[in-house]
Amino acid sequence: MLTGTGTAGAYHAGVLKALQEAGVKIDIVAGRGIGAASATFAAIDAGEQLWGAAGSWSTETAARFYRWRWTLRLGVLALGLALGALLVPLTVLVGGLALFPAGFVLQLFGLETGGWLAVQYAGLVEALFDPGGLPLYLPRFVTVMLLLLLGVLSVGAVIVWLRARLRRRARGGLWWELLGSPLDQSLATKTLARKLWTVVCGSGSAARPDATELGERYAQLLAENTGQPGFRDLLLLVHDLDARRDFVAALLSEPFRRSFFLRRQGDDAAERHLETLDLADTGRRQLMDMLAASLSLPVATEPHLTRFPDESAWQGETHRLCDRPESTVRLLEEVANAGAEQVILVSACGWPSEPGRLTSGRRDPLGRVGESLVAVESASIRDALALPSRLFEVVFQIRPTHNPLGPFDFNGSYDELSDRRHTLAELVSRGYEDAFSQFVNSVVGASGEWIDSR
């Protein structure tokens, strides 16, 4: 069970590599967030696309997964130049307040430099505030920058509107439509889809993946190889903003498939069909929608739009889907519904902190958002582990003791505890080492010794 956001996928890659090398038999892989992408590759024995030298988590590939939207970057630049220009007169006056006392002090010591500085500065001020200087060009420059800001936001909104496969009505002012969400996850979706296309359709196929065809071929490949080494059942979890429900997409083998989708027990059994999607049936066309939705973060990115089939319970409606970082409890419950008895929970969140290990908080916006996501996920894992023990025989955990990389630190991050910078490649290695130390050696190795002793 793989859970996390952003750089957590690098940790998943290291763990999956270790489990594969150790020959651990895995029957089903489940994920939310970036873990859904990791699970999608692991289900068809394509983990090499994650941890390989040219895989999804090489620094060059992942560095641009979650970036500020280009319209926001250019808009902030234009706005900054406009504000900077408006501050020029004030800067000149403040500089004069500091310069004239300094010149006076120099004159007290008999240095002619002080008088020369005062004269030169007075000439500069006179030239700047001449009717043909700042009073003429400053308003024009500020106006051009503000028009550029408006133009960039407008062009960005038009491009998004033209590229959209689906559209939904929205309420609110025009400015909010122009601004949009701050982060863009489209490159992450395209990169993972392209690598998945290479595995499923072959490197000689068309360079531009078709989402519908990719979903159908993926489901066909997994269905044809059910039970073969390296192939596993798949379960993905996203959140439906419009239905206000968690949405589960699964591709399961029999007999678990029938019992999973036609569950008749419990208070929510009557609404089960509203929250599930069978990827082995007509839902296979929406596999890439589920993957794209799992990479969409609440508020920070635009939600992913998907249109449900006409024959589904939602009767062709178009809904907004995204990830829900605190859904670990629901994911664990659905894994139990799929028939799992033993679970390996993999998360890049470090273990809960103890007294005396307080570190500095982040000041950058992405760092702050990342800290909040990690805190929410960590609390969700704690709640998930508090579920009744009757659901599983045992739940193993693979987590780093300390992870200095936040969800958006694709280019690395400085760590106070070790007083050095950590990279994404190190996080892959950390996942590999933790998988061996926390599961392979301690669990698989111990069970092997016990069998030998019998």
Image (cartoon, grey):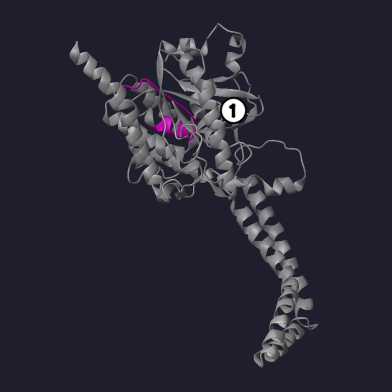
Give the labeled residue for mark 1: 239
Q: Is residue 20 left or right of residue 285?
A: left
Residue 315 placement (x, y as % from top left): 63, 21
Q: Nearer the viewer, residue 386 or 65?
A: 386
Splitting the image into 4 quarters, where does residue 256 fall? Answer: top left
Splitting the image into 4 quarters, where does residue 280 fall? Answer: top left
Q: Nearer the viewer, residue 297 or 382?
A: 382
Amino acid under disc 1: His
Q: Which residues are magenta?
A: 25-41
Q: Residue furthest top?
A: 265
Residue at the spot 58% in from the left edge and 30% down from the top edge: 324
Q: Is residue 78 left or right of residue 445?
A: right
The question of residue 147 being in magenta is answered with no
Residue 24 in view in this figure = no
Q: Residues within 10 Å of mark 1 (few under 14, many from 20)?
A: many
Residue 164 placement (x, y as % from top left): 61, 42
Residue 171 in view in this figure = yes
347 shown above or below 101: above
The question of residue 36 being in magenta is answered with yes
Residue at the spot 45% in from the left edge and 15% down from the top edge: 338
**Secondary-structure class at tag 1:** strand
156 shown above or below 144: above
Residue at the spot 77% in from the left edge and 71% down from the top edge: 139
In the picture, which quadrant includes the N terminus?
A: top left
Residue 239 placement (x, y as % from top left): 59, 28
